[in-house]
Amino acid sequence: MIKRHYLLICFSLFLALVMALMPLPLSTDIFRPDWVLLVLMYWSLALPHRVNIGWAWVTGLIIDLATGSPLGVNSLCYSVCIYITVSNFQKIRNFSIWQQAVLVGLFLALYHLLQFWLNHFLLDIYFNPEYLWPALTGMFCWPWIFLLLRKYRRQFRIR
């Protein structure tokens, strides 16, 4: 039987997936934060014993299937970022929310650079500095994502 807290975590990831797939104008699409990775990072910091690399791998596969990217690219990139997050969650929790935002921005930059590197070998694409805009916007969105999901976790008593 699936427990209630798993369903609530899945629901938040589903909303992040919807926000990631929602169509935006081309001029603003390059600034779209990585909603799914931000939500995964929050849950891996809040509940590292529940949300870990396995969740990142499965969520990355779902993103790969939904966006049509090469299978496994997002899974590997999500898994690397969540591995670093989970292995250092006690240190990261002690940072202020703005210090966490800077660190999350670095993790998002790592994610985009890994994704570019894998896509460069698979699809022969070339680096464009616009690839890193979502890392900057994700860094600015982190405090609000953190506070919103923390309220959600406390209100529904997700442990």
Image: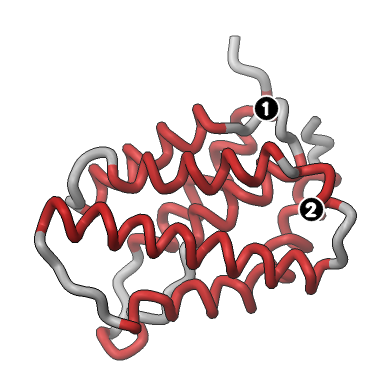
Q: Which residue is mark 1?
A: 50
Q: Position of residue 140 (x, y in %)?
A: 64, 78
Q: Position of residue 47 (x, y in %)?
A: 74, 35
User: In the image shown, does 89 or 58 lie closer to the viewer?
Assistant: 89
How dense is the environment of label 1, judged by Cα within 10 Å: few (below 14), some, or many (20 and up)? Answer: some
Quarter of the image that includes the C terminus: top right
Tag 2's secondary structure?
helix
How dense is the environment of label 2, judged by Cα within 10 Å: few (below 14), some, or many (20 and up)? Answer: some
User: In the image shown, does 105 or 64 lie closer to the viewer?
Assistant: 105
Counting labels gives 2
Kindly check if marks 2 and 1 are in contact, taking CB atoms under 8 A apart as contact. no
Q: Residue furthest left?
A: 124
Residue occupying the point 35% across, 66% down = 22
Tag 1's secondary structure?
loop
**Which quadrant of the structure image shows residue 100?**
bottom right
What is the basis of the colouring in this image?
A: secondary structure
Q: Residue furthest top?
A: 1
Residue type at numbered disc 2: Ile
Q: Residue 92 bears which disc, if any?
A: 2
Q: Is residue 82 left or right of residue 73?
A: right
- The answer to whether 93 is drawn above or below residue 71 in the figure is below
**Which quadrant of the structure image shows residue 121?**
bottom left
Mark 2 vs 1, N-terminal side: 1
Residue occupying the point 29% across, 62% down = 116
Q: Position of residue 21 (x, y in %)?
A: 33, 61
- The answer to whether 44 is drawn above or below residue 68 in the figure is above
Q: Is residue 60 left or right of residue 72?
A: right
> What is the C-alpha distance between the residues marked 2 and 1?
17 Å
- The answer to whether 146 is drawn above or below residue 24 in the figure is above
Residue type at numbered disc 1: Arg
Q: Position of residue 142 (x, y in %)?
A: 67, 68
Q: Residue furthest bottom?
A: 27
